[in-house]
Image: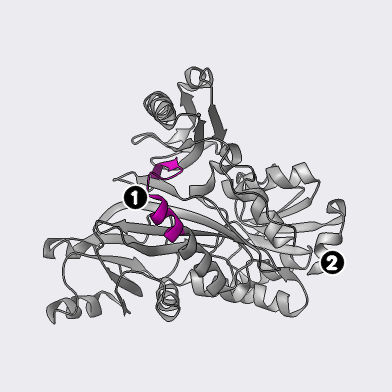
Amino acid sequence: MSNIAEKTFSSLKLGILGGGQLGKMLISKTNQWGITTFVLDPDSNCSAASQCNTFIKGDFKNYDDVYSFGKLVDVITVEIENVNAEALIQLKKEGKTVFPEPDVLQTIQDKGLQKEFYKKHNLPSSDFLLFENVSEIKEAINTQKIKFPFVQKLRKSGYDGKGVVVIKNESKLNDLLEGTSIIESLVEIKKEISVIVARNAKGEIEAYPSVEMLFNPTANLVEYLISPSEISPQIEKTAANLAIKTIEGFGLTGILAVEMFLDNNDKLFINEVAPRPHNSGHQTIENCFTSQYEQHLRAILGLPLGSTNIIMPAIMLNLLGESGYTGLAQYKGLMDCLKIEGVNIHLYGKKETRPFRKMGHVTIIDKDLSSAKKKAEFVQKTLKIIA
């Protein structure tokens, strides 16, 4: 691994599995450093396709596609965790540099294995049970092994609120999802926060200040976040230590987003993790000395980690497609928002909009957080994505 950092960036070939907006923003930093990038994605119109040096159309869930892609590059990383880990394991055996580590990816891909990992490492998380199908869940309800309310999560392939349902009472049992899943006790949540932490191959670790996430109640997506979180210094310290302990436990190289619940008793629980740049870190592009994208590159290339200190407070808004609109995207109110100091608009280049599709994000920075909130309220009311 040590010789990766010694290579000139101009000769380094970085392969990214997935070509969504996270890949696009990662490539904005590789372009700054002159790193040659390859992207594998099934959609030739994906956000990163026009940004990388070489785009290859293929399925990052397919063994052969991932294996063949990996042979073309020096270092392989991901912008989405649901990739073919078996191919990455084989590539690593053959000497390819793969970060995050494929065995860690396999654990994180399965929410059941994630929960067992937290239990094994004494990391606080809500109580859980594992089930193969809906029939088993209903039987457990009948025998009172499961009590209302509870949360069901499919063990694999869930993302952005998909594969998750809250079952508050018996009348909602028809909402249960078919498939292997976990059932969790419903935590009484005061706040949802996220801590992004990075670890390089030398084992050096840096954690970003926590951010507070507020969710769209319909789409179950992060609607906006506050950086830094409005929590006590003690809870902030506890959250950072919990994130550090988690990445150390995994032995992961790269970026890890650790999403947590803060309950009404000010106790923290890990919800789940993401082993890649994350929606809760977009604001770091403008409001931190080192963005999460640069930090991920530093970590996987064996470079010193950058400062995670905040330059200025921020509010980050996700730009979601408006309900009732499907088709060629139009950005209503864009000009009015661009006039405001501290408003940074990122559009992902997705041509087609649909309800609640992530089309971009806006980061509002201001020395005064309350002022940033007022600007964010204006942007949220003004900037709409329609068709």
Q: Secondary structure at mark 1?
A: loop
- Magenta stretch: give its range: 222-239
Answer whether residue 232 is magenta in the image: yes
- Where does the C terminus fall, quadrant-wise? top left
- Where does the N terminus fall, quadrant-wise? bottom right
Q: Secondary structure at mark 2?
A: helix
- Residue 167: give x, y in percent of width and height: 21, 62
Q: Is residue 361 left or right of residue 270?
A: right
**Residue 381 seen in this snapshot:** yes
Read off the residue under disc 1.
220
Q: For residue 38, which numbered disc appears in the image?
A: none
Read off the residue under disc 2.
3
- Residue 101: give x, y in percent of width and height: 63, 71
**Residue 387 seen in this snapshot:** no
Q: Residues within 10 Å of mark 2 (few under 14, many from 20)?
A: few
State the residue at coordinates (67%, 51%).
306
